Image (cartoon, helix red, strand yellow):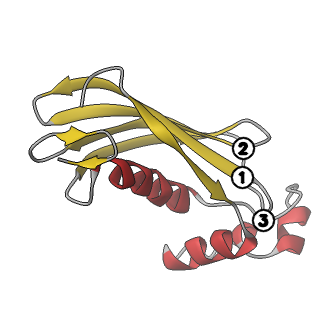
Amino acid sequence: MRAGDELPQLTIPVTRTLIVSGAIASRDYQDVHHDPVASQEKGSPDIFMNILTTNGLVGRYITDHFGSGTILHKVAIRLGAPNYPGDTMVLTGSVEQVDGDTATVRVVGANAIGKHVTGTVTITVPGGASAGGAA
């Protein structure tokens, strides 16, 4: 793991089921995450993904690449364009900084509208990591 390393893309189809199940799993019962009519009444064209689901997908992206032993110390993300049913979110990342077994990884998740999520994840990979998984 070196500063400047690029992570491979992860493509996630954004389905209605993913949006609703992510909201339920994170106990986020806001109607905009499961009720299309209520979402439209509030100005949205459809239901949209909540930040907790996005946070989980960012974590998955990191551990898929660096391995299941990776420790996520800090996930600092900001939402932008909503993820609606039928979207595809593509996560990309790059290692910004490395200090021993600890690194900061910049992550961007984009869909057809724009950037859905941007941020950084601070991780420790026990024993370091090689591209594609834990060492």
Residues at circles 2 and 1 in contact by the CB criterion of under 8 Å: yes
- In the image, what residue type sits under mark 1? Thr
Which is more N-terminal, label 1 or label 2?
1
Q: Nearer the viewer, residue 5 or 62?
A: 5
- Label 2, residues with CA under 10 Å away: few <14, some 14-19, many ≥20: many
The residue drawn where x is 14% and y is 40% is 128
The residue drawn where x is 89% and y is 57% is 45
Label 1 or label 3, whichever lies nearer to me, is 1
Is the residue 133 above or below the residue 33 in the image?
A: above
Residue 110: percent from left, percent from top: 66, 40
Is the residue 16 above or below the residue 8 in the image?
A: below
Residue 32: percent from left, percent from top: 74, 67
Write down the residue under mark 1: 88
Is the residue 98 above or below the residue 69 in the image?
A: above
Which is more N-terminal, label 2 or label 3?
3
Residues at circles 1 and 3 in contact by the CB criterion of under 8 Å: no
Is the residue 39 above or below the residue 118 in the image?
A: below
Q: Which mark is residue 47?
A: 3
Rendering quarter of residue 99: top left
Q: Is 50 placed left or right of 66 in the picture? A: right
- In the image, what residue type sits under mark 3? Ile
Q: Which mark is residue 129?
A: none
Write down the residue under mark 2: 111
Which is more N-terminal, label 3 or label 1?
3
Q: Secondary structure at mark 2?
A: loop
